[in-house]
């Protein structure tokens, strides 16, 4: 089996490298991965990016648009016949219709191909006609990305790590009590296994709602057609060296390994390992609103996310010998429209600090990284309001829950990100001298001029970093 797997891996690498060489000579394709943890805005990001590449009036920071070299963009059938198509048309209709609403969030892998006709630049541009560059956008849940870290862990190590990490969390107490009362060395009982798995899944749902990001295994949150399968019927239990064969503990261990081999590895092989460029969307404002523990948890999650990438440059021989690598990684703090533009530098500084360790590691491996704050779809307007003799920079929008318009001041983000990260690292329970709030706005009713995509903040700068070099 080991020799067969090795041969299969070599053949896949050779095929990938050959395909890449052919594409680079004729119609190159860029495989862009889009992910983020819960509520980060992946669906809106992809929808607005595609809409704004088709109608490019708001994309002036993308050099191919600014220089007039991007002639057209059109949707084509995606190259992967077994992957669901990203439902661009219905998502765009939801955001731009007469009664706009946020589309459903990502629950599985999907894909979309946008083909771009580009006039080449440089010395020989006058002797060449336009060329086609295919942008293959792959949308996948961030929770599945965190699952890739499980590949290097044993069931025992994973259980010890999880039980230690969640020991003090209020949301975990029902599951911890049930696990503590369980005799894991007793013979396996399927009803008991299902009860434990359901209790652990309920904890993961509660933890995600509370603002935690280490909610793995990710398929427990988004099971899809695996719901109820043995591969999703396990949970962390205290280790024991006395557990015999056919015991509950041994069956949990077997199912954990099945989850890795039958669920996580195919996702890595079929989707993740083929990505060229990656954007990781981060809802940093919600983490700040949830408190120091959520911010520290987010920092760890960003480091864990980067650890599963293979960053570096893609040469022909390197793809054969080492497999495809991720050349560029963008960490983007979303929902920048929830802040007045005066506060955007602070939000950018925070996302840079949160991802510093991850970005340094990627740069060392040869990948380009960047961090910025953006809003893929702007849902607010800005205004200044007088309060106690000073002007507060506010945003105004329609509240999602009530449908009523409201002006909102979320609090003053610190100039120095360490004012947030230091108490988070130290385990503080709450912010000592500040109160941060997060609101949820509904999408605004839009009136778009011909040639303009949906309004955004720095989406064009994100596109320039991710694909600008491929459009030259």
Image: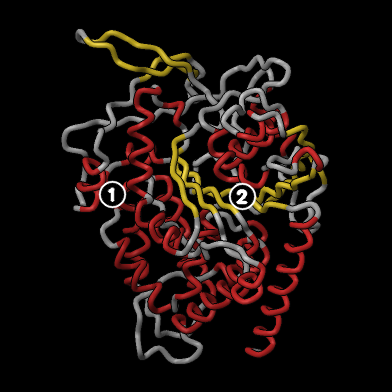
What residue do we see at 34% from left, 70% from top?
Answer: 161
Mark 2, residues whose alpha carbon is within 10 Å: few (<14), some, or many (≥20)? some
Which corner quadrant of the image does residue 204 belong to?
Answer: bottom left
- Comparing 302 with 441, the one in front is 302
Disc on res. 431: none
Measured from the top left, where is residue 453 in percent x and y? 66, 25
Which of the 4 quarters of the picture holds residue 446? top right
- Mark 1: which secondary structure? helix
| Residue topped by disc 1 | 293
- The answer to which of 211 and 324 lies nearer the viewer is 324
Quadrant of res 4: bottom right
- Which badge, 2 or 1, is on the more N-terminal residue? 2
Residue 367 as seen in the image, left or right of residue 78: left
Q: Which quadrant holds the C terminus?
A: top right
Q: Which residue is mark 2?
A: 107
Task: Residue at 35% x, 80% y: name it.
Answer: 239
Q: Please state the horizontal and vertical placement of residue 427, each as a whole percent of the image.
A: 21, 52
Q: Residue furthest front?
A: 123
- The location of residue 10, given as percent across then percent down, is 68, 79
Asked whether the beta carbons under mark 2 and mark 1 sit within 8 Å of each other, the answer is no
Residue displayed at 35% across by 11% down: 384
């Amino acid at each position: 089996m080991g020799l067969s797997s090795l041969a299969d891996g070599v053949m896949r690498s050779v095929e990938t490298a050959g395909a890449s060489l052919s594409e680079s000579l004729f119609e190159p394709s860029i495989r862009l991965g889009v992910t983020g943890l819960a509520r980060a805005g992946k669906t809106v990001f992809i929808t607005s990016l595609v809409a704004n590449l088709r109608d490019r009036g708001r994309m002036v920071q993308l050099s191919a648009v600014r220089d007039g070299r991007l002639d057209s963009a059109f949707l084509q059938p995606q190259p992967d016949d077994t992957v669901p198509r990203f439902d661009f048309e219905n998502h765009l209709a939801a955001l731009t219709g007469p009664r706009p609403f946020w589309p459903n969030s990502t629950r599985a892998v999907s894909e979309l191909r946008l083909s771009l006709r580009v006039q080449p630049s440089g010395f020989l541009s006058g002797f060449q006609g336009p060329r086609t560059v295919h942008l293959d956008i792959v949308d996948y849940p961030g929770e599945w990305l965190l699952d890739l870290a499980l590949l290097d862990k044993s069931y025992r190590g994973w259980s010890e790590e999880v039980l230690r990490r969640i020991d003090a969390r209020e949301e975990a107490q029902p599951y911890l009590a049930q696990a503590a009362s369980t005799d894991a060395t007793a013979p396996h009982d399927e009803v008991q296994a299902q009860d434990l798995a359901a209790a652990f899944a309920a904890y993961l749902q509660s933890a995600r709602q509370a603002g935690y990001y280490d909610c793995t295994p990710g398929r427990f949150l988004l099971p899809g057609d695996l719901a109820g399968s043995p591969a999703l019927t396990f949970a962390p239990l205290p280790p024991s060296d006395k557990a015999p064969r056919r015991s509950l503990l041994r069956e949990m261990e077997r199912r954990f390994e099945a989850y890795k081999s039958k669920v996580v590895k195919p996702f890595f092989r079929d989707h993740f390992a083929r990505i060229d460029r990656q954007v990781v969307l981060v809802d940093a404002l919600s983490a700040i609103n949830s408190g120091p523990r959520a911010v520290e948890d987010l920092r760890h999650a960003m480091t864990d996310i980067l650890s599963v990438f293979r960053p570096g440059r893609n040469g022909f021989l390197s793809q054969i010998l080492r497999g495809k690598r991720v050349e560029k990684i963008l960490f983007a703090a979303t929902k920048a429209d929830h802040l007045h533009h005066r506060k955007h530098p602070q939000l950018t500084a925070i996302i840079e600090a949160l991802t510093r360790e991850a970005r340094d590691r990627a740069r060392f491996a040869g990948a380009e990284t960047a961090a910025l704050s953006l809003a893929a779809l702007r849902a607010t307007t800005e205004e200044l309001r007088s309060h106690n003799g000073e002007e507060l920079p506010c945003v105004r929008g329609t509240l999602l829950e009530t449908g009523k318009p409201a002006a909102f001041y979320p609090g003053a983000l610190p100039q120095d990100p360490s004012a947030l990260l230091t108490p988070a690292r130290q385990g503080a329970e709450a912010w000592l001298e500040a109160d941060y709030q997060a609101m949820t706005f509904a999408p605004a009713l839009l009136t778009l001029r011909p040639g303009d995509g949906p309004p955004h903040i720095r989406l064009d700068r994100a596109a320039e970093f991710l694909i600008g070099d491929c459009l030259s």
